[in-house]
Amino acid sequence: MRPIKYTLAIVLFLGSLKSARGQDPSFSQFFSSPLNINPALTATINGDFRMIANCRDQWLGPASPYRTGTVSFDGKILKNKIPESSYLGLGGMLMYDEAMQGVLKSSYGSINSSYNIKIAEGENGDDHRFGVGLGLTYCHKQIDYSSLSFSNQFTGYGFDLNMPTGESALTNMKPYISANLGFLYSYISQYSNIDIGVAGFHLNRPKQTVTEDPKQFLPVRYVAHANYSVFLNERVVLNTNAIYQIQSRTSYFSAGGAVGYYLSNEGEEDVILNAGLWYWSNNAIVPYLGLVYQNFQFGLTYDVVVSKLAQASTKPKTFELAVIIRSKEKIKGIIPCPWK
């Protein structure tokens, strides 16, 4: 790849690193990345285990300045050693995030554990459940200085990358480990499910700096989310969900839903077609198309930008793909939805 030459953009970029106000990666299909939303969602599955892969390519075009991807696995453990009304979950996730066409690369690895118990049972067999989840995240960030050009390297005829940058004080960020905590309340009936959760990430506020400044820390990310699923009839299921996140001075919410239609008949392997729409506050409208085939689920979104970026001569294009594989064992009473 050719060296990327910046002037004012580099100054702003390095200034943002110095202030250490970077935000965690986010997905339009947040409901298909549960371990990135709340550690208490670990093993909250319509089955015994699931594997998820997410891929987001943001502002695709002549360049792809932002790319994010994850692979995760979670499931229930020690099923025969704890009460049937409870379950213990364990999961892990690997994530990569590239900004500025790979100039800034971030690698994450996390491990989560959760415990979910039945706290009450209604007259009709409805369950009220409560869960708590703990997680640890390891992160390593690296800046590729060979792809950057600085004003000190400008000769009047172009940039000479062999010249000194004048930025000798800059270093790559040291890896850090952050602590995460989440809580989840669920109501499960025969025809509807409700989940409400809150979580906090980076509660220990690990240091994140390229200027050796001991006062620069990664801000805590707070998350609140809710999900409601209901059968409208024997073939149609409605899934709605919303999320609100705040980190440092930046916040956003996303809300929407999808309608799923059973293409298969009762007694056959599940084949469900999902279509929906989400709104990402002050950013985009996100159409969603998904398919469930047996224990496989696919979801594709495209961000229709409604911010000022929509006025650019080159329209930003953002696609996101999610693939989920669940165990074939189904948990009675849990309605099929992208969240579980």
Image: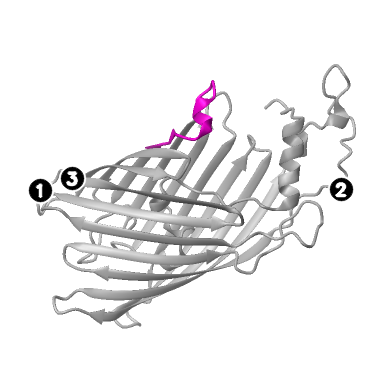
Against 145, residue 239 (above or below) is below
Q: What is the three-letter code of the residue carrying label 2?
A: Ala
The residue sitting at 89% across, 30% down in the picture is 163
Whether residue 207 is visible here, answered yes or no, is: yes
Spatial CA span between label 3 and label 1: 11 Å
* Of 68 and 184, the residue lying toward us: 184
Q: Are marks 2 and 1 in contact (CB under 8 Å)?
A: no
Circle 2 sits on which residue?
A: 169
Q: Earlier in the sequence, mark 2 or mark 1?
A: 2
Task: Specify whether residue 42 is in view.
Answer: no
Q: Which mark is residue 265?
A: 1
Assign the N terminus to one quadrant of the image. Answer: top right
Q: CA distance from mark 2 to mark 1?
A: 66 Å
Part of the protein shown in magenta? 301-315
How far from the left and from the top, in percent, is residue 15? 75, 44
Q: Please state if 170 lies on the left or on the right of 297 as rendered.
A: right
Circle 3 sits on which residue?
261
> Is label 1 in a helix, a strand or a loop?
loop
Q: Secondary structure at mark 3?
A: strand
Is 278 contained in the magenta span?
no
Q: Amino acid at mark 1?
A: Asn
Q: Residue at image x 41%, y 41%? A: 321
